Every structure is written in structure tokens, then in C-alpha cells.
Amino acid sequence: MGDTSSTGGTNIEGESPQVEPTVETDEATITDDAELERTLGLSGGLAIGIGTMIGAGIFVFPGLAAGEAGPAAAASFAVGALVALLVALPTSELATAMPKSGGGYYYISRGLGTLAGTVVGLSLWFGLVFATAFYLVGFGYYAVDTLAELGVAVGDGLVIPLALLFGAGFTVLNVTGTENAAKLQNGIVALLLSILVVFLGYGGLDAVGLVGESTAPEQFAPFGTLPILTTAALVFTSYLGFAQVATVAGEMKDPGRNLPLAMVGSVVIVGVLYVVTVFVATSAFGSEQLSEFGETAMVEVGRHYLGAAGAFAIVFGGLLATMSSANASVLSTSRAIYAVSKDALLPRRASHINLRYGTPHVALGMAGGPILLLVATGRVELLAEVASFLHLVMYGLICVALLAVRRDEPEWYDPDFRVPGYPAVPILGALASFALIGFMQRTSQFIGIGIMIVTAGWHAYYARDVTLKGVL
């Protein structure tokens, strides 16, 4: 079991029978005192947040969500955005006080102790793994549809192989450097937003009858109000990106300014896009027909408004969106593993940094392997909900951690940003996060609870004697 203690600093020092601080220079790796380079600016933070969230929310969920809630799926996305904002504000305060890689894990471990930190840190690892697998499966569907629009019919049998291939590719890309991955992310998001602004602009004008032919409006909530909340629980995976910005806090320039702007800004921008997208989609087709189109319903929406050019724009945009979500999630998953390992809650080897590229290559391998295993299942909705479950637990505990840290006000706590409306905002954020879990499918809840029990068992076996450092 880990047995470490010290005061001050950001890492754990000392020795453990199973965890020894070592430095390795063969293969250009180093541990312990190595830190990740601060290469990400505001645009990079927004690109990670927007790029992660925009994929599932706009290109995979509209058909699934419309089948569950009808046009009221737009309200489901609005509920998700509200919960995300209630959490983004407390997360922003903690992030400016503790701009370290690991995000929610780091804040909870320092605010609530090693047990909560271990459960959340390892659950964040698994939650991001489930989310990344979900994005990659969506990518596979859009890759197949893109080929179909180009006249190459390959069938759905190629969805999983393509998802596996690109999942491995994104892992390798992130090993070669955060800056490389960020450049790809910035380019993808810029192109994607350009496509969406044009498409949603025209579709919105058509939906309100200013261009094209007017259509009879569908009842807003044909299945009642409860499906709005159950659908919000399903689609909440769409809002995981803002917290992923915090997982790379240790690599951001001027984190006191850029972290809050990136987190809150990405939620607002993407939340508006989601609501408009569902409005445009349900104006083109009834919710029942959208549901029949499934994961690539937006392709048919594009075809409805702009013909073959619209369909191709959407399949290409969907390809970019799911690609950016997967790429950003691979990056964030590895940083969660890196942060837990730096604190000796996992073996220290997981926090080794490759000196050639300045990336945590072992952590990236520990992220990529499980992701590929889950991709092979192809279970889109289950992957999404388990990811949401584990993240909602973390979000609720982040809000609780803020309350605990504010109560104690340790000497090192000096955030550049403070939550407006404290303590109401973190209290509401915690309650909303935990409440949304109650509207998920039982299978997703059981899997999520099972993962948390396993992580608590790992703490009892390996990490119960670890003493975390304070924050400098």
C-alpha cells in the first residue's frame, strides 16, 4: 500500500513498498518532479471544451433524444446546460486556485480527502473511457455515412473497425505532444463551427417560415414532462467537455483568466447550439421519424434543408465533431490517470513523462487500451449514460468540495475567480447533479455504482495510507 506524507508542493514525496520515486532516462522518460508544459491558451481551452461537447450533442443525439421526448428534447438539452453551468462556476473557482492537471479529481482530493479523491479520480478515468468510446462509435457511424455520400457503400459492419483504428490513432497523436493534439483540435473546431453556423442559420430561417415551405408544428411535449428529465440524463454526456478543460489546467497559460472563460464560455456556446439544432431537426421531421433515422438523423435533416450538399456537409461535420470529441477525451483521460498517479493513488509509473514529447505516455496507454475494448461493444446509449453517471457524481462532489474548502479557507487557497451567488450556486449544482442520476436507466446506475465500489476497494487495498500534499 502507498505510504507517503509531506507538506507543501504538488506531488507526494517519500517512499512506499510499492511506489518508489524513480527517474528513468532511457527512452527519455522522467517522473516525480517533471511537469507538463503550459502550451494551451484560451482558444485551446475553448477548443477542448467545445470540441468535446459539440460532437454527441449535435450529431449523434437529436434522433435518439427526439424519440424519447419529442420536440421537448430541446428543453432536455437546456436542462443539461443549466446543470453544467451550476457546476462550471464552482469548478472555475477551484481551478484558478489549483491549476493542476487532473481537474475534478485534484479539487475533490484536496477538499474531501483521499477516499473521495481515489473514488473520483479512478471513476473519472473510467467515465472518460466510456465517453471516449461513445464518441468513437459515433465517429464510426459518420465515417461510414461519409463514404456512402461519396458513393462508396461499405455497410455498418465497418463502423467498429473504423472506430478502433482511429481510437488507436488519436492515442498515438496525443503521445507525440499536447501542442500537436491542440492544433488538430483548433482546426477541427473552427471548420466545424463554420459548417454549423451556415446550416443552422438556414435551417432556423426555414423552421420559422421565413424561407422554404411552412410545416405544421408538432406538439412540444407529446410524451409528457418526465421524459424531458430522463432525456436530459441521457444527453448530459454532451456537456462533459467543460470539465475536461480543467483536466489540462496544468498545461494552460494564464489559468486564472483562461480557465473560467473556457469552461463557462464553452457551456454557453454549445448549449445554444444544441437547443437550436433540436428545434431545426424537429421542424424538418416529426420526432417519430427522427427516431427511426437513429444516430445519423442529422444527415437526413441536412438533406431536407439543402439537398445532397446539405447531407454531405452534415456527414462531414459529424465526422469532424465526433473526431474532435474523441481526440479531446483521449487527452483528458490520460491527464486524469496522470494526476492520480502523481499522488501515488496509482503506481507512480503511470505518471512517467516522455522527455522527447513532454507527454504522459504510460497514462495515454492506460487510457487507449480500455477505450478500444469498450468501442468493440458498440452500445451507444449505455456508454453515454455510464459516462454521464460517473461525471455527475464527480460534479456533485466538486460543488461539495468548494463548500468544504471555503469553510476551512486554508492559507494556499487564493482563487483568481470566485463564484457569484455563493453558497447557493454550489449547493444547487450538487443537488442538480445528484438528482439527474435518478432519471437514468437502472443498468447504467448499476454499472456506475459497481465502478465506484471497485474504486473504493482499490483505496482500501492500495492507497489508504497515502497523505496528500497541500497546494502551492
Image (cartoon, helix red, strand yellow):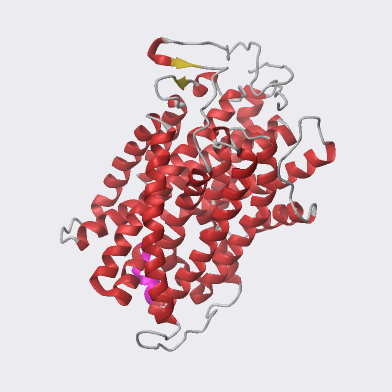
Which residue is painted at 23% across and 70% down in the image? 308
Q: Is residue 143 left or right of residue 210?
A: left
Quadrant (top left, top right, bottom left, bottom right) of the C terminus: top right
Residue at horizontal 54 percent and vertical 46 percent from the top: 447
- Rendered image quadrant of residue 76: bottom right
Above or below for 147 versus 418: below
Residue located 28% across and 54% down the image: 143
Evaluate whether residue 379 shows in this view. Answer: no
Residue at left 37%, top 69%?
199
Looking at the image, is 367 positioned above or below residue 50? above
Please tell me whether the stretch drawn in magenta is mainly helix, strand or loop.
helix
Is the residue 207 above or below the residue 66 in the image?
below
152 lies above or below 306: above
Nearer to the camera, 37 or 465: 37
Quadrant, the N terminus: top right
- Residue 388, can we see it? yes
| The stretch drawn in magenta includes residue 293 | yes
Query: Front-most of 306 and 363?
Result: 306
Residue 90 position, x and y percent, is 70, 48
Highlighted range, magenta? 289-295
Task: Residue 453 in the image: state x and y as whole percent.
Answer: 62, 38
Q: How many marks?
A: 0
Q: Does the magenta stretch include residue 181?
A: no
Q: Where is residue 455 in the image (x, y as percent from the top left)?
A: 60, 34
Q: Position of residue 131 (x, y in %)?
A: 47, 47
The one of 122 and 244 positioned closer to us in this rendering: 244
